[in-house]
Image: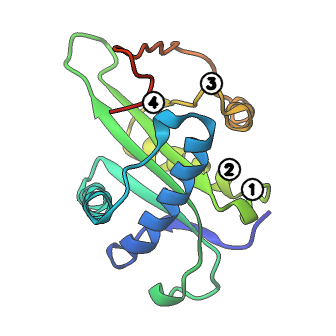
Amino acid sequence: MAEGRVRVARMQEIDRVAALWTLVTEHHAGLDPLFRMRRGPVAEGELRELLRAMARDPDAAILVFDASSSGTVGQSIIEGICIVRIDRAPPILEETERAEITDLGVRPECRRRGIARQLVEEAMSWVRDAGVDRVEIQVASGNVEGRAFWREMGYTDLMRVLHKRLGSSSEPR
């Protein structure tokens, strides 16, 4: 088990959180081009603003695995990230709330040390504390390692998401 702790990301470290989120997304882009991020200063600024908005949202949490021994922001070593949010549906269904873990990732050199498990357990605790009874995740069909992890964590199939590209190009727009 990795030494460190899971905590909520601080606004002052959004740049480092964005860098880790980019690294995680690049890993997923290797599984499917659909996950490729736009490049350049505009996209990077949008990513940081998205993270700042999530950090301010009471229905979202950006959790990080901090491997540092001190609580000092400048010295924290962020090895993993988990983003979780609560969705509220119109009251036409009996269950009107659900949580979704939208992103989970660990630095490649830090994997297989229990960091992702600790992040998910803390996310589930945050969801329980919010009074929500169900958590969903989406995992790419090509992410064999990710699918195995989520199954091990007790997640089961709910839906299949199908998609189709329109037009002559298979490249994203």
N-terminal of the pair, mark 4 or mark 1, is 1
Q: Nearer the viewer, residue 116 or 95?
A: 116
The quadrant of the picture occupied by the C terminus is top left
Q: Are marks 1 and 2 in contact (CB under 8 Å)?
A: yes
Say the numbered circle drawn on residue 114: 1
- The tag on residue 141 is 3
In the rendered image, the vertical position of residue 39 relative to residue 103, given as above or below: below
Crowding near the residue tagged with mark 1, few <14, some 14–19, many ≥20 C-alpha atoms within 10 Å: few
Instruction: Look at mark 4 in the image and give the residue it sits on.
Output: 133
Q: At which x and y percent is residue 27?
A: 61, 49
Q: CA distance from mark 1 to mark 3?
A: 23 Å
Q: Which label's residue is closer to the chain start, 4 or 2?
A: 2
As rendered, which of 74 and 99 lies closer to the eye? 74
The location of residue 113, given as percent across then percent down, is 78, 59
Badge 4 density bin: few <14, some 14–19, many ≥20, Cα 10 Å: few
Amino acid at dot 3: Ser
| Circle 4: element type | loop
